[in-house]
Image (tube, rainbow, N blue to C red):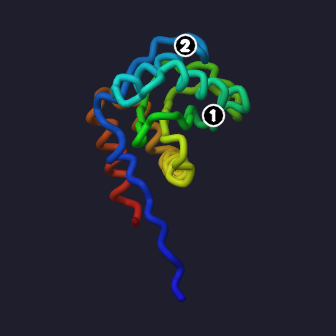
């Protein structure tokens, strides 16, 4: 019997140019979360922006999604969403997002997931975690000057992974 190969979800298929922000303005965790929720809401697929904000804030209150190395992955499942929405944003200069390593957070991946699709929600979070383990990817994302460059970095990473 052979082991079943897990199908990974390609982040480059989820992330769209319109869901990338290269210069977050917020100066504290709540302001940053608010901007990230607005970015997700720009999809017009999010039924209840307030409920999603509350869900992300509640998730953060359980423990910061800032995983270290300048990266945070705020996320929540929400009612009325039929498909995943992934957004990416940068905070130039970084911000205290209560990271596990105590360092500033510069890069934010925010994920809105359908309420009942826990399996794929976890797969996407795992894929983001794989992406940001690479210090060259992190540096590339920090230095990226335009949105298409961000998408190229995602695509290059995925080309080097066997699916």
Compared to residue 128, the image places residue 69 above or below, namely: above
Task: Please give the name of the residue rendered at 46% of the width and 34% of the height, measured from the top-left corner.
Answer: 80
Q: From where the camera sits, is residue 140 visible?
A: yes
The residue tagged 2 is: 31
Badge 2 element:
helix
Task: Please give the name of the residue rendered at 37% of the width and 55% of the height, measured from the top-left corner.
Answer: 158
| The furthest residue to the right | 62
- The C terminus lies in quadrant: bottom left
Marks 2/1: CA–CA distance: 15 Å
Task: Please give the name of the residue rendered at 56% of the width and 10% of the height, measured from the top-left corner.
Answer: 27
Badge 1 element:
loop
Residue 83 lies, in percent from the top left, at 40, 42
**Contact (Cβ within 8 Å) of mark 2 with mark 1:** no
Q: Quadrant of residue 58?
A: top right
| The furthest residue to the left | 148
Front residue of this view, candidates 127 and 75: 75
Compared to residue 36, the image places residue 134 above or below, namely: below
The residue tagged 1 is: 65
Residue 151 lies, in percent from the top left, at 31, 40
| The furthest residue to the front | 80
Q: From where the camera sits, is residue 134 visible?
A: no
| The furthest residue to the bottom | 1
Front residue of this view, candidates 161 and 110: 110
Q: Earlier in the sequence, mark 2 or mark 1?
A: 2
Q: Which mark is residue 108?
A: none
Residue 152 lies, in percent from the top left, at 29, 43
For mark 2, does the 10 Å Cα neighbourhood hold few (<14), some (14 to 19), or many (20 or more) residues? few
For mark 1, does the 10 Å Cα neighbourhood hold few (<14), some (14 to 19), or many (20 or more) residues? many
Residue 161 lies, in percent from the top left, at 41, 61
- The N terminus lies in quadrant: bottom right
Task: Please give the name of the residue rendered at 60% of the width and 22% of the height, measured from the top-left corner.
Answer: 54
């Amino acid at each position: 019997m052979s082991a079943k190969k897990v199908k990974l979800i390609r982040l480059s298929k989820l992330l769209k140019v319109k869901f990338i922000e290269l210069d977050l303005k917020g100066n504290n965790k709540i302001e940053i979360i608010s901007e990230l929720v607005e970015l997700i809401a720009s999809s017009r697929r999010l039924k209840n922006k307030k409920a999603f904000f509350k869900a992300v804030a509640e998730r953060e209150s359980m423990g910061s999604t800032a995983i270290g190395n300048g990266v945070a992955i705020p996320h929540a499942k929400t009612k009325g969403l039929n498909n995943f929405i992934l957004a990416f944003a940068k905070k130039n200069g970084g911000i205290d997002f209560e990271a596990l390593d105590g360092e500033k957070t510069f890069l934010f991946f925010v994920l809105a997931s359908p309420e009942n699709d826990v399996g794929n929600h976890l797969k996407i979070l795992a894929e983001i975690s794989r992406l940001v383990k690479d210090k060259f990817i992190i540096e590339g994302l920090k230095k990226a000057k335009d949105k298409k460059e961000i998408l190229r970095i995602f695509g290059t990473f995925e080309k080097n992974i066997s699916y």
